[in-house]
Image (spheres, rainbow, N blue to C red):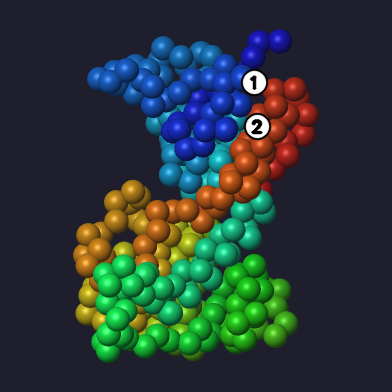
Amino acid sequence: MESLGVLMLHPFNAYLEQELDRRFRLHRFWEAPPGVPRDEFLRAHAGSIRAVVGNANYGADAALIDALPALEIVASFSVGIDRVDLAKCRDRGIRVTNTPDVLTDDVADLAVGLAIAVLRRIPQSDRYVRAGQWKAKGDYALTTRVRRFVSCLAIAKRADAFGCSISYHSRSEKPVPNYKFYGNVVDLAANCDVLIVACSLNVETYYIVNREVIDALGPEGVLINIGRGAHVDEPELVSALVEKRLGGAGLDVYENEPFVPEQLFGLDNVVLVPHVGSDTEETCRAMADLVLGNLEAHASNKPLLTPFSG
Ligand code: DGY
């Protein structure tokens, strides 16, 4: 049987790249010779590309799908597949897989870690010690107790251990015992100290954190975003932080990654990390194995391991 032709969009994981190369016929999109337009590269290989492997930032958009007439499956190395044109995949009968569940714990760890880093000012303390300022400690700013959290269950489980009282907003009708439900995000923000955004990006959640929500969170409030940059009105977030209308933020995701608004660099009340929620050895290996397993299942007509079921 002819080996499956796979187009990997970016070198985001060395193990995955190596295994794709070993098990399939791999085309590396980033290896298009400089100056060769993307269309030309695709035209040269289009006939043999039956699978695309992307991730949270590199997806199969309409133009890519249109350029690949033999495309049968998009296997994303991510749980979020907001960069995949799902409508087009549906029309063309292209299968879509993602990597659910295996990254939940690591992303939840980072969400809580960011909240603690912002509230307890861990990066600032580190800079303080490195700058040799500890000797005096006279001007050392006191930090804030880790109090109330809000967010998804994996995060809530961790926040429970800190004695936080947990509130949440969700579209799911299923009530979560012991946690307080709010019917809208503004009321939720007005009643919590730390607001953690952990949902998928779609038309309903685009800019779900807008000026009204930020104002409801207020100058003592902290926003943590481990979802997608476009969940938050970023220019509004930046202004609120600069003007101290919002107390602080811990951000793993940004609206136009890898671009991070430069005004944030000078602010002491933010902790910035480069979309690394799932970036542990263990999770990346598990995600890569799911991508590989899905492609192998597709190539041998077996049921997919994790078909996207959005
Ligand atoms: C995903 O897999 O969608 C996450 O953004 C990774 O952090």
Please report the residue visible at 63 percent of the width from the left and 60 percent of the height from the top: 105
Q: Amino acid at mark 2?
A: Leu
Please report the residue visible at 62 percent of the width from the left and 48 percent of the height from the top: 283
Q: Position of residue 275 (x, y in %)?
A: 44, 53
Residue situated in front as seen by the camera: 281 or 16: 281
Q: Amino acid at mark 1?
A: Arg
Residue situated in front as seen by the camera: 170 or 41: 41
**Label 2 belongs to which residue?**
292
Residue 150 appears in the rendering: yes
Please report the residue visible at 50 percent of the width from the left and 41 percent of the height from the top: 55
**Label 1 belongs to which residue?**
23
Q: Are marks 1 and 2 in contact (CB under 8 Å)?
A: yes
Residue 71 appears in the rendering: no
Q: Is mark 2 within 8 Å of ligand 1?
A: no
Say above or below: 62 vs 44. below
SS under mark 2: helix
Location of the N terminus (image quadrant): top right
Q: Position of residue 249 (x, y in %)?
A: 38, 72
